[in-house]
Each structure stands twice: as structure tokens, then as C-alpha cells.
Image (tube, rainbow, N blue to C red):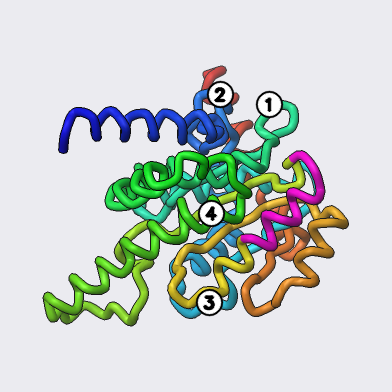
């Protein structure tokens, strides 16, 4: 590769990073000491989410986790993000927040693409090729950007993995699914914090269209309050592509609160001894 091509690629990476909101990731220092579930709490809902993440035959590639303010949605999303990253399952995470200025939904796709290059390095050459082929790509609609910067690169890598698998005559159970080989989960937390209800709706519709594609193996965990526009959009979306979890008394929050308080009181007691 010539020095000129290296220069062009570095420029494209910079432009992509500038178009993204990298501070919205679960590891971002800007989010400070992000809350996560206390050990032995929220285990039931986290286990349900992880079972969905790992399942090849689960209903829907979108999971909508909903609940009122203060129900612990972001805490659960943070914990799942950390767990999935450690297990090489996380493609990207985006934590919306109006108060922190992370509320621009138009930065979502470029953020996913940027983080996907890190999570799945083999996608980088495909993403860079798209940016070099069309210098105006980052000015296009989020739907076009998603197609060019996420769907096509991920699909290209998936096809390469499938071809390698077939050529190697591996005895591993591939079953046409790459989710056991490369990261496959995108987490979008606090969608109701995204600026503009129309943008919120577009994001859901765009993702619903993506996961309906048989060649697309990425799953999306979306958390939000049950706002009217979001509810209506999901209600009008093909129910075969999404499933839902509601943070209600079914998950026995009082028991988790009791465990947390007992742990904190024990910690205070130890410091006083």
C-alpha cells in the first residue's frame, strides 16, 4: 500500500470518528463512573437477555427493554455491555443522554461503524473502501449510511467466514450463523433520550428492516421508557423481528433492593470495626 493510500485511509478514519459520538460508548470516560448492577441483583433479567443474545433461534433479533425512569434500564444495559464485551459478543454500544449532549440520533450509525472496526477488525477494510468510493457518504441519510457502513461490511465479513468454514471442511456446527464466531450485539440505551420523536421512530424502523434480512446476524438490544411514539412504532412493526421485556414486579425488584441494602450495610459495618 502506498503512502498516499495510507494517508487517505487515515483521513477517512478521522472523518468517521468526527461524525460519530464515541463518548456514547459504554467505556467512555465522559460517562464517568457509569452505574452497573450490584452483584447478585438483576440476575433474572440479565439472564433472560443473555439467553436471547446467545440463542440462534430466539424470537426476534431486536429486544426492547422498557420501563419507567429509575427502573434500572441503563444499569442493566451497562452490565450486559461489559459482560458481552468480555465474551467477544459486543459490536457497539450507544448510551443516549440529553443532559450530557449525547442525543443526536444521526451520529448513531457512524458510531456503530467506528466501534465495529475495533470489535471486528476484518470489517475495517470494507468500511474504508466505502468511504473512499464515496466522499459524501457521511452526509447521506442514516438509512444509507447503515447500509453502506454497517450492513454491507458485516455481511462481507460473514461471507468470508462462511467460505473459509466450507473450504476447511470444519466439523464445527456453523449452521449458516456467524454469531458464535464474531461479535453480534449492538446496544442502544435510552432511545427516548434521542432528540426528536421522528428520529427515534426512524431508528426503530431502520433496525427492524435490517434484522428482517436473512443474511444479517446482528442483534439489537434497545432500552427506553415506554414513550407513546416508541410504543406505537414497535406496535406497527412486524412482531416476528422483535421481542420485549418489561421491568416490572415480575423481576421482583424488592428482593434486589434488599440484597443491595444488606450488602451496603455490611460494608459500612466493616469500615467501623
The answer to whether residue 164 is left or right of residue 246 is: left
Asked if marks 2 and 1 touch (Cβ < 8 Å), the reply is yes
Q: Give the range drawn in magenta.
A: 195-206
Q: Distance between the residues labelled 2 and 4?
A: 25 Å
**Which of the image's four quarters has the N terminus?**
top left
Mark 2 highlights which residue?
A: 30
Q: Distance between the residues labelled 3 and 2?
A: 34 Å
Q: Residue 16's spot in the image, x, y percent?
A: 46, 35
Mark 1 highlights which residue?
A: 100
245 or 110, nearer to the observer: 110
**Circle 4: element type:** helix
Disc nearer the start of the sequence (2/1): 2
Determine the residue positioned at 81% across, 62% down.
231
Task: Identify the main secondary structure in magenta.
Answer: helix
Q: Which of marks 1 and 3 is in front?
A: 1
Q: Residue 179's spot in the image, x, y percent?
A: 38, 67
Disc nearer the start of the sequence (1/3): 3
Mark 4 highlights which residue?
A: 146
Q: Distance between the residues labelled 4 and 3?
A: 24 Å
Numbered tag placed on residue 3 in the rendering: none
Q: How crowded is mark 4: few (under 14 residues within 10 Å), some or many (20 or more)?
A: many
Q: Is residue 201 magenta?
A: yes
Q: Residue 219's spot in the image, x, y percent?
A: 51, 63
Mark 3 highlights which residue?
A: 58
Q: Distance between the residues labelled 1 and 3?
A: 35 Å
Amino acid at each position: 500500500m502506498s503512502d498516499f493510500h495510507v494517508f487517505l485511509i487515515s483521513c477517512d478514519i478521522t472523518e468517521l470518528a468526527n461524525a460519530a459520538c464515541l463518548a456514547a460508548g459504554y467505556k467512555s470516560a465522559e460517562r464517568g463512573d457509569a452505574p452497573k448492577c450490584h452483584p447478585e441483583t438483576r440476575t433474572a433479567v440479565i439472564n433472560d437477555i443473555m439467553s436471547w443474545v446467545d440463542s440462534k433461534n430466539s424470537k426476534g433479533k431486536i429486544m426492547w427493554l422498557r420501563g419507567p425512569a429509575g427502573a434500572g434500564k441503563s444499569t442493566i444495559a451497562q452490565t450486559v455491555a461489559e459482560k458481552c464485551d468480555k465474551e467477544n459478543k459486543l459490536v457497539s454500544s450507544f448510551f443516549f443522554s440529553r443532559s450530557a449532549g449525547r442525543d443526536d440520533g444521526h451520529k448513531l450509525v457512524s458510531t456503530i461503524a467506528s466501534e465495529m472496526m475495533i470489535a471486528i477488525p476484518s470489517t475495517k477494510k470494507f468500511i474504508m473502501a466505502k468511504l473512499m468510493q464515496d466522499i459524501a457518504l457521511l452526509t447521506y441519510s442514516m438509512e444509507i449510511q447503515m447500509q453502506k457502513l454497517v450492513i454491507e461490511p458485516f455481511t462481507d465479513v460473514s461471507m468470508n467466514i462462511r467460505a473459509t468454514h466450507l473450504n476447511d471442511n470444519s466439523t464445527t456446527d456453523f449452521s449458516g450463523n456467524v454469531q458464535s464466531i464474531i461479535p453480534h450485539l449492538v446496544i442502544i440505551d435510552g432511545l427516548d433520550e434521542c432528540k426528536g420523536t421522528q428520529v427515534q421512530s426512524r431508528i426503530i424502523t431502520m433496525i427492524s428492516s435490517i434484522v428482517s434480512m436473512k443474511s444479517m446476524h446482528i442483534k439489537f438490544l434497545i432500552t427506553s421508557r415506554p414513550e407513546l411514539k416508541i410504543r406505537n412504532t414497535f406496535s406497527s412493526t412486524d412482531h416476528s423481528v422483535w421481542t420485549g421485556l418489561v421491568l416490572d414486579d415480575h423481576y421482583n425488584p424488592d428482593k434486589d433492593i434488599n440484597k443491595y441494602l444488606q450488602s451496603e450495610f455490611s460494608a459500612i459495618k466493616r469500615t467501623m470495626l
